[in-house]
Each structure stands twice: as C-alpha cells, then as structure tokens.
Image (tube, coloured by chain):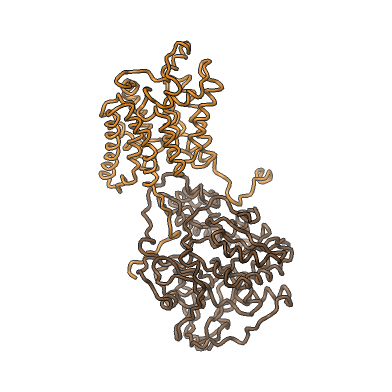
Amino acid sequence: MQTLTFKRGVHPPDEKALTMDKPIKVILPKENSELFFPMSQHIGAPCEPCVQKGDYVKVGQKLGEAKGFVSSPIFSSVSGEVVDIRPVLVPLGVKSLAVVVKNDGKMEEYEGIKPRDYTQMSNEEILAAVKEGGVVGMGGAGFPTHVKLAPPPGTNIDYVLVNAAECEPYLTCDYRLMLEQPEKLIKGLQIVLKLHPNAKGVIGIEDNKPEAIKLLSDMVKDIPNIEVASLLKKFPQGSEKHLIYAITQREVPSGALPSAVGCIVDNVDTIISVYNAVCEGKPVMRKIVTVSGGAPANPGNYQIRVGMTYKDLMEQIGGFKVEPAKMVAGGPMMGIAMFTLDVATTKTSSALLCFTPAEAFIPPERNCIRCAKCVEHCPMGLQPFMLNQLSLRGDGEGFVANHGLDCIECGSCSYECPAKRQLAQSIKATKKIEMGKARAKADAEKKAAESKK
Amino acid sequence: MDNIVVSSTPHVRSGESVQSIMRDVIIALIPATVMGIVFFGIKALLLIAISVASSVLFEYLYQKIMKKTVTIDDLSAVVTGLLLALNIPVGASWWMPIVGSAFAIIVAKQFFGGIGQNFVNPALIARAFLLASYPTAMTTWTVNGVTSATPLATLKTLKDGAALADLQIPSLMQVITGNGIGGCIGETCAIALIIGFAYLLYKRIISWRIPVIYVAVVFVLMGVFGRYGVRMPVYEIFIGGLFLGAVFMATDYTTSPMTAKGQIIYACICGLITYLIRVYGGYPEGVSYSILIANLAVPLIDRFTVGKIFGELPKTKEAKKA
C-alpha cells in the first residue's frame, strides 16, 4: 500500500506505546456524584436547558435543546435528579451554563431509545437522527455533524474521509476504537455514504498503527465504495485540510470548507457516533478518553460518561504515581492546559494528559535566530516568525496581510523552534483579536445595510 | 497540586535549542581548527583561544553592564570568536582578535539587539574591520615562518599581464589539502571544511543550498569566463576562503534568507560578487565582502520570495486587474 502524506509538518515522538495495547475499559460515574452538562459543547449556538431543577432524567434524555441550525442538543448520560442549572467551568477555562445531574446509579434508560434499520430510512430521517443524536465533530472541533453531512445544494461530494490519523502524540483512543469496534465504524461510514451515493469512503490511518490498517483493510475489501489509506506518521496529518490533501491531492482554498473540494471529513468517533445515533437510537453520551503521560498510575483508554469530571475519572483509575505538574485536556500539540481536574468532560474530550515536572518543562524564550525552521515546517506554508513579530508589535493589518488568519494553530512552529519562542501562542492570540474585529465589522455592515432598507 | 503549569500550546517541544545548534557548528569547525593549528603552529592555537575567550567575555560584560539576561550559554559568542580567529592570518598580533571580537560582539551584534538581530555576520564584519584597520598585518601570510603569497594573490598578477606559465602556483593537490599554503588560519584545508559541511548536513543544521550553489556559481563563472584567458575552475574553488565562507559564513541563519528560493538567489549573489572581486576587484579575495554585501540584500530577498501558502488561490488575470 502506498503511504500518503502532505508537505512540511513535524515529527514529534508519538509516545503511543504507553497506552496502545490497553483495551478500552468502561468507567461509570460514581453513585451520587454530580455530572455537569455544559450547554455549549459544540461550535454554534449554545443549547437552552429543556429540563428544570428537580426533574428526574434518564440515560439518553435530552437536557438541552439545540437553538438554531448550527447547534446540537445535549443529553444526560446518567439517570438521576437535576439538582441545579448554573454556570460551570469548562476545559477552555471559561464558564458555561450547565445542567447538573446527580447520578442515582440506576442507569435507567430513556424510553425513546430504540434500534433502527438505516437502510429503511430516508436521507432526511438519517440527518434528523444524526441531529437528534447530538453528534458533533468528536475529534475536538465539535462542529455539528448534521450540518457537515448536508452541504449546500449543488455541492458535489465525491469523498467521505474518515479521519483516523490520530496524529497527536500520546492519543490512542481512536486506535482502540478501530480495533474494538470496527464494524460500527464501517456501518457508520456506510450510513454517510448512503447520503452521498456518488462518494467514495476512505479511512485514512497513520502508518504507526499497522494493526488497525490491516484489520480495516481486510474488513472493507469486499465493499466496493470503501477503502483504507495508509498515511505517513507526521503531525498534523489529522488536520482536515492536510488529510484531504494527502488522500486526494486537493487543496482546500483559503477560507473555504472541505465541501468546496468535494470532501466531507469526519473523525473515527464521530462516524461511530453516527452509527450509534442512527442504528441504535443512542445519542452521544459516552466518550473514549486516553489517560496518559508520566504522572497517572494507570495510563490507558477509558470509556467514560460525558459530563463526569476528570477528577472522578482519575479517582476511579488509581490516581497519580507522581504529582502532576501539567494537566492537558486533549493532545500535547493542541490540547488545553487546565489548572484543575474539577472540570466536566464533554463530547469533544479525547484525552487527559498528566505530565511530570520534567515532561511539563518548557525552556524560556530566546531571541529568534532566523533559522527558518518554522517556515520550513509550517503545514500551511506561513511564515510564523514574521507573524510572531507582527503579533508582538500589535500590527493586526500586517498579520492579516501575511495570511495569519490561515493558521490552523497546530503548533508545529513552536514545537520546532530552537529558540523556544511562543510562536503559536502569539499567533493564536492575534488571530482571535483580528477575527473578532472582522466579525464586528461584518456585523456593523449588515446593520448599516439593514437600516438603509 | 500547588505547582500546576498552565500554558499555551504546544505542550511538547523538540530537543533542539540554540545551544545545541551552536554546539554542532563548533563540532563542525573542529577539523578546520585542528588543521589550522597543524599547518600554522602553536601561534594559531593562541589566536583562536584569545579570540574565543574575548568574544565570550565581551558578550558577558556587555550584557552584565546593560543589565540584560546573560546569554553566553547559547554558545553563539564561541562560534563568532572561533570563526573570527579562523578568518585572520597567523601573522596577526595577539591583540588583534581582541579588537576584532569587541567589534563583532559589541558593535555588530549587541548594538543591534544581540543574537538574531545583527544584519551582517559579526565575524565577517570584524574581519573587514581588521582588514581596513591593519591592512599589512591582515594580508601578510606566513607559512612555517616564511612569508609567502597566497595562490589568489599570485593569480591576481594575471590582471597586470603576467603569463600563467611564469607563475609559481602550488599544485591542485596541495591547495585541496592546504599543506604549505598561505592563507587565513581556518581556510586553507578544504578537506577539513568539507568534513564539517558533511557533519552540518547530517545534523540538518544547514541545507546544501547556499554552500553548494555558492561554490557552483564561482566554479561556472571561472570555467566559462575565467580570468584573463585562464580557466581553472576546479583550482579556483579550492583556493582562498571560499569553502570556509560558503559553508560557515554564508549559511549564518540570521544573515541569510529563510526560504529555499531566497537562499538560491542569495548564494548566486555571493558567487557572482566573489567572482567579480577576485577577477576585477582590487583585492585578490572577495569571499568576505561578497557575503557581507549579500547579507545586506537579505531583507529584500526575504520580502520577494515569500512562498505560496496552502490553499492560496492562484492569481487570475481578473484578480490582477481588480
């Protein structure tokens, strides 16, 4: 099999050996523990709570109703009483309104959950099932999947790509899912392909997971419209744009979505969630989380209930062998550092990395020596050193003119920088400011146009 | 959990640092340094030691006095001091490297903001400074205690109408090994410099582009146009400081372009100016000045060689009109 790849990128050590061979272990939230369901676990409009304090809810019952098309409902992952509706801390470090459910440990299932046969369903019914299942991009982005699966009319989709690159070091949750639930993955992909009958399904897997490549290749060899692609182990292979490029040689134009080049990209767990939502009628309630790094006593892959806190999870799996110096929700390249584990897991949680002081150490910044490694490795072909200078100078215009808004925030520049400069950090910050400005400008123009009318 | 680090992404970094890069450059310079001491004797070792020590000291003192963070641990001052010593003749007085180091470190490097901020190569500009200040000492070449002309100086007489047959120039083998050849301490042994180049390539510290294209341009110009009817391209690339300059000076990160395209243009400028100075200029050697001039062109080169970004739409005619 030919190994596909993209230009530039970096090669951090993958550190997957720690958890690669650990089968997924089911961890249930402790009885009487509180679970938190933030109303914003996706890109788009936050949900509105559809239960009240004191209500009794069951597993799979809706807690938050989607507001708007680009939004996705939230479901309870346990049964118990709604004890509060209040803002709670989410991994990003901000507070979000959440429904708090006290787990009664009975795990009583909601009556609405019934298996279905997708082949008997119309496309509209499938899309509705995906939407009502609360399926979002589970790899971390959290973009509502029903929106992605229904591109604007007139768009020709000729590839449905399953993002199974799992290019972040340490992470093995998608790998374990592929090994343990491959039939669900393939079924899920077939459901998506039913919506786009002219498309070819390709499962893109990095070549550091040969067992998954072999297993899935064998399973799809008699399915004419699905194949497996072997991708070179290189970060950020799992970036949507770079996965598309590696498999189809198409470049998603700056500022456009994958559908512009006829592609839909979904992560492994997203496709499995599509299967769960459509065929089993189960909304998104569980998540596979890789716990890794040098600090946890028992690194591994754990199936958790969405809404339980990282603290609850760590207590149930033996805690730490070394006091952690850094805790990251997500992978080491793009994950979010947290200052407490008292944070609820969400639909997009994929990993909890706990680093020892040595692993957490990042050397101080030095002067840029213009070695050009950031330019050489930027997967978007940007000039991170320049964007860093412009950011520090506060030159937003220059930043935009130098394509700063095209940054995918992968962190390859900071990873490679021998002067240990915080390139990605400064670029991310300026990007946020400039995008805010652009949005404000667009809003003002819209308003002005409306007032003219 | 009292000492939790919360920082922006990414949470892991490569093992490479400014210090490790500079260490590799020093390792790559060891063969040339050793051969310089072998050919030019203990005086060469003395000049190298003085140059390195004074470079580090000036950096330390400047940063201390200016209340800046002392960064001598990044080893860049060691590299500057070493390169400066390798770029002066063994006949130089012991205090000349000190003057040179002061100029390199304080004027060329620290005045502009320290490492990464200088717009010309500090060691080269210090060499140019010494050459302008002490022209006789800086162009007196002694080998084994005997003053001799460098092959470049000998070939320069072709300009004044000398015939090649009358010139006493060393054999090709001799200029490749550097044995008994007059020149700066570190420039005569091409083999040692090529070993250093191989090491830098292996360690991925530099790319092949600048050194190979630089030398190739000189080779081609000397082969096609030659000097006053004499075409000895192979011989010409092995004499003088071309290898030292191409491998260790022109590739200085701070003063060379960042993109592949830019590096090619820059190397061509270096090669062209070296050729012009060697053949038509007043000096027999043009490597230092060509690199210094090319250094000045780097900001412009960088500006015009920005690569296409991923997903950038090709500029159509309509877009250009608009």
The answer to whether residue A452 is seen in the rendering is no
Q: Is residue B154 above or below residue A114?
A: above
Q: Residue at x 68, y 73 (%)?
A: A127
Observer-nearest of A180 and A254? A180
Q: Is residue B237 above or below residue A328?
A: above
Residue at left offset 54%, top offset 40%: B305
Write down which chain is painted orange. B
In front: B261, or A16?
A16
Total number of numbered discs in the rendering = 0
Query: B158 left or right of A149?
Result: left
In the image, residue A74 lies at what x, y percent? 56, 77
Q: Is residue B201 above or below residue A426?
A: above
Camera-side residue of B144 and A127? B144
Horizontal and vertical percent position of residue B29:
38, 36
Residue B248 percent across, percent down from the top left = 42, 35
- The quadrant in which the C terminus of chain B is found is top right
Quarter of the figure that contains the N terminus of chain B: bottom left
- Residue B246, located in which quarter of the rendered image? top left
Which picture quadrant has residue B2?
Answer: bottom left
Question: Does residue A405 show up?
Answer: yes
> Color used for chain A?
brown
